[in-house]
């Protein structure tokens, strides 16, 4: 098949817009990566990978606005085409991938109810054998996704962030955007010895020692620069091993010069190129789900944070797609 034939085949198979309109990124329904919109995902043709938005930011401690993240990531993802230049592959064509819309969350003011409704939604996805790739929303949305995926076997976790998110309680609550990994360990769906935090430069670190006590590994931002991205990826692969693994990417892992639009920015982070290189170094791992969280459009500038989020979400999609193709074969 020629490159042109492959292009036409992928667009016709996977995209919401006809091939004649594909290059007009400003036109048509803004789905994730212009994929088909499948609100009928439970009743229509089976899916391999579901792209999902979770527009909730009730778990935030500082600047709100991440609830608007999924919509703007969808908008910016129209600028990302079907082919991954570095990985030399496309996630589309051989797998059924679609935007199934946003998670069904009727609650708007009660975070516990939001978490419960999200869990029920993602359990329906997982029981159908579909792999979720999720756009938040604040980081608390990760909790129900991981819980749905980790019911049969505890998950490994690769966590990109400027913060540990290992706070056992904040203001009397153990449900917020810094508690989900503590909860996952305590509830048994995360394996602490297979957790790797990457990019940490957390001003609250002295108060978040739970993960270290439980055996989690931290590769803080200074260590990332000392080792280099290839060595960081190699160490991460060694720790998580071959077991089922989840990737959670908080956009504030990037330096604010690359991602100003987020709720808790921290100076001294990685570049968008370094983040892509780190993700590419994880190829071949058993990635069974992923999320990209904490994009906050009200604090963004020229859409650069949402664009970075969309690009990193595409890299996550490519990692998951490769793993699905290996599993199917």
Image (tube, helix red, strand yellow):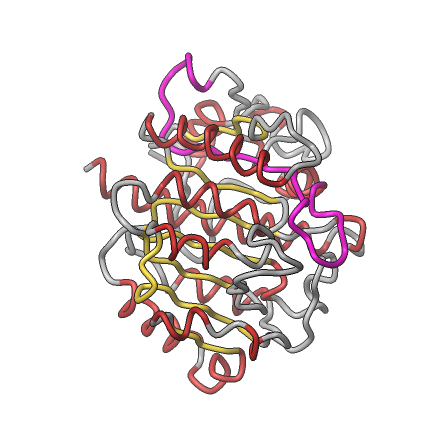
Q: Nearer the viewer, residue 48 or 252?
A: 252
On the picture, is 206 further left or further right than 87?
right
Please say whether residue 54 is one of the residues in the magenta stretch: yes
Q: Residue furthest left?
A: 329
| Quadrant in which residue 122 is drawn | top left
User: Residue at 64% across / 53% down in the picture?
Assistant: 294
Instruction: Kindly report the secondary structure that dominates the magenta region of the rendered protein.
Output: loop
Q: Which corner quadrant holds the C terminus? A: top left
Task: From the viewer's perspective, tell me whether residue 2 is left or right of residue 326.
Answer: right
Residue 264 percent location from the top left of the image = 70, 63
**In x, y percent, where is residue 192?**
34, 63
Q: Position of residue 107 (x, y in %)?
A: 65, 29
Q: Nearer the viewer, residue 236 or 7?
A: 236
- Image point (54%, 38%), residue name: 115
Q: Position of residue 205 (x, y in %)?
A: 56, 76
Q: Left or right: 325 with respect to 132? A: left
When asked about the image quadrant of residue 4, the answer is top left
Query: Which image quadrant is residue 253 in?
Result: bottom right
Highlighted magenta segment, given as a residue range: 41-67
Nearer-the-camera pick, 288 or 21:
288
């Amino acid at each position: 098949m020629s490159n042109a034939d492959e292009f036409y085949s992928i667009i016709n198979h996977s995209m919401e817009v006809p091939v004649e309109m594909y290059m007009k990124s400003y036109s048509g329904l803004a789905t994730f990566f212009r994929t088909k919109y499948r609100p009928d995902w439970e009743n229509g043709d089976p899916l391999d990978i579901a792209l999902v938005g979770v527009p909730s930011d009730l778990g935030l401690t500082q600047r709100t606005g991440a609830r608007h993240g999924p919509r703007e990531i969808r908008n910016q993802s129209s600028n990302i085409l079907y082919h991954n230049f570095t990985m030399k592959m496309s996630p589309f064509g051989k797998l059924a991938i679609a935007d199934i819309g946003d998670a069904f969350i009727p609650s708007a003011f009660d975070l516990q109810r939001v978490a419960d409704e999200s869990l029920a939604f993602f359990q329906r996805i997982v029981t159908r054998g579909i792999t979720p790739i999720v756009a938040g929303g604040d980081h608390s949305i990760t909790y129900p996704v991981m819980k749905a995926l980790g019911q049969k076997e505890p998950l490994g976790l690769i966590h990109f962030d400027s913060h540990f998110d290992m706070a056992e309680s904040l203001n009397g609550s153990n449900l917020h955007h810094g508690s989900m990994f503590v909860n996952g360990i305590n509830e048994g769906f995360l394996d602490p010895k297979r957790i790797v935090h990457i990019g940490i430069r957390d001003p609250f670190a002295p108060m978040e020692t739970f993960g270290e006590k439980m055996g989690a590994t931290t590769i803080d931002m200074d260590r990332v620069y000392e080792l280099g991205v290839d060595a960081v990826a190699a160490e991460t692969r060694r720790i998580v091993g071959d077991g089922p693994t989840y990737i959670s990417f908080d956009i504030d892992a990037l330096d604010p010069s690359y991602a100003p639009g987020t709720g808790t920015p921290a100076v001294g982070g990685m570049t968008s190129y370094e983040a892509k290189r780190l993700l590419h170094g994880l190829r071949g791992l058993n990635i069974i789900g992923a999320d990209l969280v904490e994009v906050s459009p009200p604090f963004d500038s020229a859409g650069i944070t949402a664009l970075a989020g969309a690009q990193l979400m595409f890299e996550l999609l490519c990692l998951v797609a490769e793993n699905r193709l290996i599993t199917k074969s």
